Amino acid sequence: VNPAPPPAGRRTSAWVLLLHTITFKQARGLVPVVLAVAAGRGLGDGPATVVALAVGITALSLLWAAISWWRFSYADGDTSVVVTRGLVSRSVRTVPIDRIRGVEVEAPALHRLFGLVRVRIDAAAGSVVGGDGELVVDGISRAEGDRLRGRLLARRVPVGPAAGPDDATPAAEPEEEFTRFDPRWLRYAPLVGGYLAVPLAAVGALFRVLDEVPDRWRPEFGEPDLPAGTVVVLFALAGVLLVVGSVVGCAAVNWGFRLVRRGGSLIAVRGLVTRRHTELEIDRIRGWSVSAGLGMRLAGAARVSALVTGLGDAARRGQLLPLGPRPAAWSLASRLVDDPGTLRGHPQAARRRSVVRACTLGVLVLLAGAVLTPLLGWWQLLAAGGVLTALGVPLGRARYAALGHAAGPRSFAVRSGWLVQEHTVLQRRAVVGWQVRQSVLQRRAGLVTVQACVGAGRGGYAAVDMAAAEAAAFARAASAPWASALAR
Amino acid sequence: MNPLPPAPVRDPAWSLSAAAIGLWLAQGVLGTVVYGLAVVLFIVVVPADAGWLVTVLRWAGPAFVVCYGVVAIGVRPRLRYRVHRWEVTAEAVYTLTGWLDRTWTLVPISRIQTVDVTRGVVQQSFGLASVAVLTASSQGTVRIPHLEVDVAHRVADDLARRAETVRDEAT
């Protein structure tokens, strides 16, 4: 077999020059330097300086964008993708197509104006020396992006009769819709820490920018004396803003979320400002986890992530349902991998251990208080210790109630966590090893932590504090016969 | 005190090279000397009348070094050697590590991705080497510390060869 001739390099659209100039993509790193120089040297005030600065930065940005556009090319050959770039040090990265785990096509707002997309090619971590396992082709037309995605993914999974890559029409395959985001689900957004953080992050960024502005350009604020009523109103207002901000943030990220199955892939599309298109290969899905924070559990909400082998940035890309009611989450999850059924609770000793652990801090504070109250009169410490200890009991019980494990015919499950409860189900074939851990205290209590090692998600999922006598049987039931080496 | 309940799972069959005790002893001596020097430095450099905290530390420092020395030299090496075990079966690699807290790790040979042999500076002077067996999971790494060098190489070669022949999808 003759080696295939090197494929012709393709270029990105020239419009990307304009795009990167507008967004100062490459020159962005220079702005703080320029600001610092300006502040240090004390440039003259006046419109001339500002205009000169703006023109200078824009020109620099254009130059930079032009160079990187000129030196960038990509080629999708028969067996690999090659991306060439760099002015002084030419870098050529070659990724074998069978190592590609996923292709994401995203269209940020500005890209959409020009009809362009950005394609992220996710290669297996560690396959490229010195790389972060991701290739980015920024600024190609929508059609070319779809062609690239179709080609890279079709190469990997031969589906159906052999068809030429050119007459493969992706739309011809039937689609099956799994989930569609219901705008009513936005009401859960204020209960999710991540979305609440969106408005806070915005405020934080604003303050950072204000901090960067030199003092003399900042308007003078006095220290205003506010009556108590105004403070209350302000806090209420801030609360309302926080809620509204989280809903808006959630809507922007998840707008029009749709999960469909097409051929052997799951495709998730979402986003208002930046449209994201993520494709996961169903063959690589090893399990799922349904997780819910404290607030989400009260409201009956949950989220679903797929655990996929060799997926970079798994927390974001693996999301199958970003936010939704619990029944929807469970019905979606159990379509992927069978739920092994009702969880077995953990023994009473685990409850004692959980409560003792939760109360430890409170008891320590209480003891310190008991010593220091007669010596220094720090009765507050004593009171705080009492409150912490009292709170520890329900906390420990709640943590214990979250524990559970189960092994079914094709899959197994573990559950733990109170602040964020995570119920994980994995296929039996997903297990690449078992780790059984026992501390001195666990040994006395007859408990053990059994962790399944998997090449997906976090890498390990543990049944915490299960009965020591059940460990070997659970490992055997949740994986293959090799695990019987654990049994006595 | 009640007697400790038995181990939750089977213990692997083989113990490490006896030279490992010497190595752990050397590490304990080294650690004790380093801590001891730090405490001596503290007592020499910091004036004795610099407040109650310094007075406490002048007593606590040496006490800590003595306790550490007793544990790290007198107790830990032998206890570690008693606990550490390893085994290669027809289908899997199995280890037990730790001294107070214990960890049993089992990895099937069909899921092995790479096998490494490493020799640290101290290990070399004791004629020892460690074997690390890596899988697709960041958590599922088996480390067999302190085997005799030729044993380590033989085990690594054997595992790598068998992993080639029985490898399934490995993820």
Image (spheres, coloured by chain):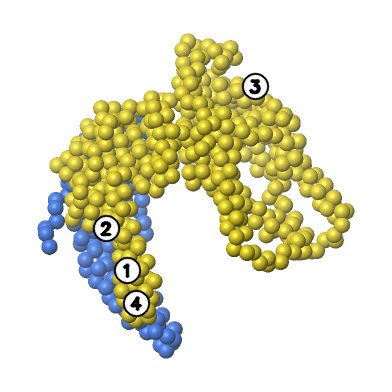
Chain colours: A yellow, B blue
Specify the subunit that label 4 lies on. Answer: A
Q: Earlier in the sequence, mark 2 or mark 1?
A: 2
**Inter-mark Cα distance, 1 to 4:** 10 Å
Q: Mark 2 and 3 residues: CB-CB less than 8 Å, in contact?
A: no
Q: Earlier in the sequence, mark 4 or mark 2?
A: 2
Query: Measured along the vertical axis of the image, is residue A128 above or below residue B143?
Result: above
Residue A106 falls in image quadrant: top right
Depth check, front residue: A29 or A23? A23
Q: Residue at x 57, y 24 (%)?
A: A149
Q: Which residue is mark 1?
A: A366
Q: Mark 3 and 1 residues: CB-CB less than 8 Å, in contact?
A: no
Query: Measured along the vertical axis of the image, is residue A370 above or below residue A62?
Result: below
Q: Identify which amino acid the numbered label 2 is placed on.
A: Val
* Residue B129 spot, x, y in % from top left: 31, 52
Quarter containing the C terminus of chain A: top left
Q: Identify which amino acid the numbered label 1 is placed on.
A: Leu
Q: Identify which amino acid the numbered label 4 is placed on.
A: Thr
Instruction: Classify 10 Å Cα crowding around label 1: few (below 14), some (14-19), many (20 and above).
Output: many
Q: Which residue is mark 3?
A: A143
Q: Earlier in the sequence, mark 1 or mark 4?
A: 1
Q: Earlier in the sequence, mark 2 or mark 3?
A: 3
* Residue B101 spot, x, y in % from top left: 25, 56
Asked if both marks, 2 and 1, belong to the same chain, the answer given is yes
Q: Which residue is mark 4?
A: A373
Q: Which residue is mark 2?
A: A356
